[in-house]
Amino acid sequence: MNEHNKRGVIANPLVILREEFDDRAILFDPETGNTFVVNPIGVLVWKHLDGHHDIDDLADIVCERAEAVPSDVTSHIENFVQAAVDLGLAGYEVK
Amino acid sequence: MAAQVMKTPRNVDIEITSFCNLRCTYCSHFSGPGDVKEDLPLESWLQFFTELGRCNTMKITLSGGEPFSRPDLRDIILAIVANRMRFTILSNGTLIDDEMAAFLAETGRCDLIQVSIDGAIDTTHDAFRGEGNFMKAIHGIHALQANHLPVSVRVTIHRKNVHQLDSIARFLLEDLELPSFSTNSASHMGLCRKNAAQTQLTVDEHSLAMETLLALTARYKGRINASAGPLADAQFWLEMEHSRRENREQPTGRGFLTGCGGPMQTIAVRADGVIVPCSQLCHLSLGRINQDDLGEIWRRHPELQSLRKRSRISLEDFPFCRDCPYTSYCTGNCPAIAYSLTGKIDHPSPDACLRQFLTQGGRLPEVTQILG
């Protein structure tokens, strides 16, 4: 398991989440002007990137609230979070 | 099926002032309800920007009047930045100095500064914009470029520059080394209505402009664009003509009043704080900033809903379009120009009518020019 899994993840406070329609949202980074389309599970995860939830916590939340969750959900969330971190949209909480 | 509407507008166009240091002969302003005597004070705009921040609006376009004429423009920009938005400014360029350009660059949030340039030499540009303004605008562009800001030029094509489009393109793209520029033409709005004979292209001139611009587009690939005016007309009308000749199926969205998607993403505010669907439809008051809830207006105002439903109105319903061979391929174009010319928003724009253009003796460019 990745060492990051136990660290809280926090969204970049400058980044805007726009929930445009029922099934689609976008993340907008005003610093770069970049936008990223996010699906409903991504939105659920994004809303919990508050520094108090690590990857396992996020996986638990998804399992609790979403339907037909795949068995490798943790790995999906890890990839999502890592992509967000790489793009400057989120970071790991520093202890 | 009804189109889905976002919960809040992504983009807001703001006429931050109705004051302008120029009086260009074909300006689309200065003869309508949007031309107010007093601008809103800074505090009102700052309050509104916090609402836009709550609405998760992404982009602001500041226009006027001339935005750089506001002495408190820096405070306005800083408030846009503080509320997590990016900005574009539409300007005549004459009031931009190095200090201002450096400030804009430091914000890191500038998407574009668009400067109006209508000629490759001062006499052409200044013919309708006033003496001395060409050099001032060029200095403004140099200041923006020196500070590595994204800068573009809008060329308004009119009767005094239509024969100089080659030299204008060369000047902007080669001498000034701009990445691109856009074009439109003097259209039947604002001061241009009064000065139409002096400024608006004749059918022959429109034909010439289309032909020249298509050739220039082929030469400077991807660097000249337009969403209105002769170049946009040439591209759209040629596609319509090909469709007619080949008897193609009606593409999705054609044959209806689908020419404007603005009300699905963008809303506008006049200099006096009145919220309108678009700065070109400034008579349609939807409410007032800091008094009315922007999200509510965006989602529920009957005028906006009506504009969004234009796309369900078939062109075949209009006597104007009766027996037109292009109806299946047409969109009716801009509702604001339709309103300006016919007094009706829910009407195709006669200004963009291919059949009318051809009937009046207009010529479409040769097909080989768009195929390169």
Image (cartoon, helix red, strand yellow):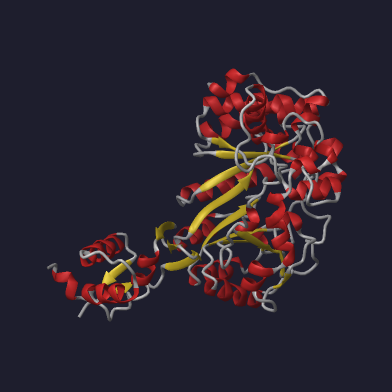
x, y percent for residue B15: 68, 61
Instruction: In this rendered view, identify the residue nearer to me: A61 or B20.
Output: A61
How many numbered callouts? Answer: 0
Residue appearing at x 62%, y 57% in the figure: B2
Quadrant into which the N terminus of chain B falls: bottom right
For residue B114, side relative to residue B163 (left or right): left
x, y percent for residue B279: 71, 57
**Residue B80, quarter of picture:** bottom right
Instruction: In this rendered view, identify the residue nearer to me: A74 or B113.
Output: A74
Instruction: In this rendered view, identify the residue nearer to me: B40 or B144.
Output: B40
Q: Note whether residue A12 is visible.
A: no
For residue B85, side relative to residue B93 (left or right): left
For residue B85, side relative to residue B191 (left or right): left
* Image height of B219 relative to B307, above or below: above
* Image height of B353 relative to B304, above or below: above
Instruction: In this rendered view, identify the residue nearer to me: B94 or B169.
Output: B169
x, y percent for residue B231: 64, 33
Residue appearing at x 54%, y 25% in the figure: B218
For residue B50, side relative to residue B134 (left or right): left
